Amino acid sequence: MVFSLLLYMLQKTVGIVLRCIKYNDSMNIVDVYTKLSGRASFLVRISRSRKSNVKSVLFQPLSFIEFEADFRAKSSIYPIRNAKVWIPFQSIPYDPYKSTMALFLSEFLYRALKEEEGNEALFAYLENSILWLDTCKSNFSNFHLVFLMRLSRFLGLYPNLSQYREGAYFDMLNAQFSSSLPAHSAYLNVEESARVPLLMRINYKTMHLVRMNRSQRDRCLFLINDYYRLHLPDFPVLKSLDVLKAIFE
């Protein structure tokens, strides 16, 4: 009976690291988006021993890990027993542009993803997108913009593009186009609204065809961030946003 209960508590899964913070002198708290159970928090013992089953270096932004954790029914933070690299990165940790993107996107996902249950489609999207960035050799300056715009579909926030007509305004609060000025201030002007359908339809392979200078890219990122803040409760101003802007100057 005791042995079967232990097997039930200890579960193996894979996940994507969203955040790692110090809890005390001997423990870190790691937030992971797991394939098994969605967003979850884990306790990781800090150890510098080469023989340790869990090494702190594993928990970098957006890293893929495979691990075994003690999923207790009455706990919200689960101790990790064993962990290792699931899919090794080729370039993200070593490229300053990609690593800064990873830092920003991990903070964004930490704030945006709240589901505590598995979502295979969302997990596959995150996995495939991160792997695309890791293996891409050039033309990835717009990656974070496309990533966030397409993420909106998985969170139920994808805007209604069917109503777009020339001269329409994009109502960010109601996620749709309007032929007249909305009664609130959360809308885009006609010129910026006209770019929304194009930007929402591009993907990683075609995004290099959309030419944007630094100020246009910054403006697009600001508006995407504002859009999410309108629709997600308690979504803050992200600390890594300024770091991301600076790296592309």
Image (spheres, rainbow, N blue to C red):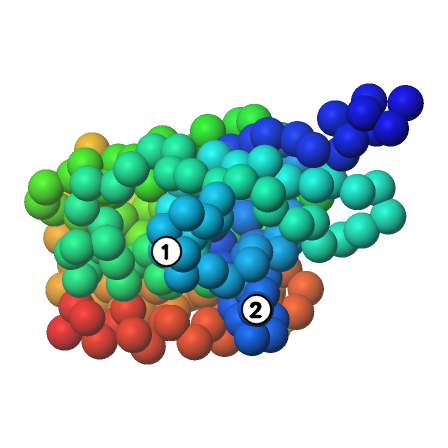
Query: How many callouts does the rendering have?
Result: 2
- The amino acid marked with disc number 2 is Ser
Q: What numbered label is drawn on residue 57? A: 1
Which sits in the foreground, 174 or 98?
98
Q: As displayed, is residue 63 above or below residue 236?
A: above
Mark nearer the N terminus (1 vs 2): 2
Question: Is disc 1 placed on a helix, strand or loop?
Answer: helix
Q: What numbered label is drawn on residue 215? A: none
Does residue 126 appear left or right of residue 207 in this picture? Answer: right
User: Spatial distance from mark 1 to mark 2, Cα to Cα?
Assistant: 15 Å
- The reply to whether callout 1 and callout 2 are in contact (CB within 8 Å) is no
- Which residue is painted at 23% across and 54% down in the image? 93
Which sits in the foreground, 132 or 152?
132
- Of labels 1 and 2, the one closer to you: 2
Furthest-right residue in view? 1
Position of the N terminus, as image quadrant, is top right
Does residue 233 appear left or right of residue 215 in this picture? Answer: right
Q: Position of residue 92 (x, y in %)?
A: 23, 50
Does residue 156 appear left or right of residue 170 in this picture? Answer: right
Q: Position of residue 225 (x, y in %)?
A: 45, 64
Position of the C terminus, as image quadrant, is bottom left
- The amino acid marked with disc number 1 is Val
Furthest-left residue in view? 138
On the question of residue 144 being in view, the answer is yes
- Which residue is painted at 76% across and 53% down in the image? 76
Q: As displayed, is residue 57 above or below residue 5?
A: below
Q: What numbered label is drawn on residue 26? A: 2
Does residue 46 appear left or right of residue 5 in this picture? Answer: left
Which sits in the foreground, 55 or 169?
55
Q: Position of residue 133 (x, y in %)?
A: 25, 42
On the question of residue 191 being in view, the answer is no
